[in-house]
Image: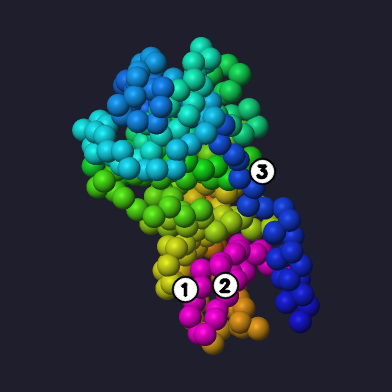
Amino acid sequence: MKIFKNIIFAILLLFMTTNLFAKAAGYIVWVDSLRLREAPSGDSKVITSLKKYDELTALGENKIDDYEAVLSDIKFLGGWIKVKTKQNLTGWAYKPALSNIIIDNGLKFYVIKSDLFVIQEKSEIVLKKISFKAEKNAIFNDIAVYTTGNVKIIGVRLGDSLANAQPQFDNVYNHYAAYHIKRNEFSPQISGYPHFCGFSKSGDYAMFDGFANDTPTLIYSATHLRPVHEFTPLKKGEWENDSVKYEEVAGKKYPGLPDLSKNKVYVKSCIWDNLSVNIIKVYEKSE
């Protein structure tokens, strides 16, 4: 009973202190050349030509995603976004040709095709870059950044090309990487677990799953920038209480890396009508 009460307390703390995410701060052009137009239409008058790496401030968006264009030899279908350039020119840009910029605590993050950049905001110095291994001709133009302590979990998502059309969900991205600020270090690419579930109470662990029922789940060490434990979904009949179930799991040993096999965490998910639902969180053991 004492352990269960401690877990409930950890649940309350989790929602108050973790899962912090940074907000978008504008857009960057990822194509070599892009026309800035007077209206949200491919037939509208051209104001100027934007270049790769030009940064833009977002002013508004046309919600009609019906314009088809070829970018980097790939067909895209999307809408238009009203932007302002650094030269104070205002117009409409084709949104699939833009990648969102995230600024968080003096760091700027964006992805150009398959390359993820970490930039010092004031000096514009490139601190680190990682290239994601992905499908042929993959274009990533959407990112999210989640922060815990000195570590940022960064998700990248494919652009809305006709070949990669897919529904968009919060906290669901094609690939992830972890970036340690003080060590200026990237983790290897995290793939196969598209749904970021959140952080543990202390922020030492992150959790990912497959965003579907009965999919594997990954517990990731934010401190060591590597997996701690991989497991299949919990089974009916394990520790349950009022349609909430728990499992205590330990980390794994990896050759040549610090031993986290004694690290204990609780995994919690909810079930309704005996079906597993992916509301899964990680809680560290509280003695």
In the rendered structure, the answer to whether residue 160 lies left or right of residue 283 reads left
Which of marks 2 and 1 precedes in the sequence?
1
Name above or below for residue 51 compared with residue 112.
Answer: above
Label disc, if present, on residue 269 of the rendered structure: 2
In the rendered structure, the answer to whether residue 145 lies left or right of residue 164 reads right
In the rendered structure, the answer to whether residue 161 lies left or right of residue 284 reads left
Please state which of the two labelled residues, at mark 2 or mark 3, is closer to the viewer. 2
Name above or below for residue 35 compared with residue 275.
Answer: above
Q: Mark 3 points at which residue?
A: 149
Q: Name the residue under label 1.
A: 233
> Secondary structure under badge 3?
loop
Separation (CA) of disc 3 from disc 1: 28 Å
Residue at 60 percent across and 71 percent down: it is: 268
Please provide percent x and percent y for residue 243. Answer: 61, 82
Quarter in which the N terminus is drawn: bottom right
Asked whether residue 40 is drawn in magenta, I would say no
Please provide percent x and percent y for residue 60. Answer: 52, 33
- Residue type, numbered disc 2: Ser
Q: Can residue 255 be seen in this view?
A: no
- Residue type, numbered disc 1: Pro
Name above or below for residue 190 compared with residue 108.
Answer: below
Span of residues in magenta? 263-287
Crowd tier of the residue under label 1, counting other residues whose Cα lies within 10 Å: few below 14, some 14–19, many 20 or above: some
Please state which of the two labelled residues, at mark 1 or mark 2, is closer to the viewer. 2
Asked whether disc 1 touches disc 2, contact meaning CB atoms under 8 Å apart, the reply is yes
Q: Which residue occupies the extreme top position in the image? A: 87
Please say which color scheme the image uses.
Answer: rainbow
- Residue type, numbered disc 3: Gly
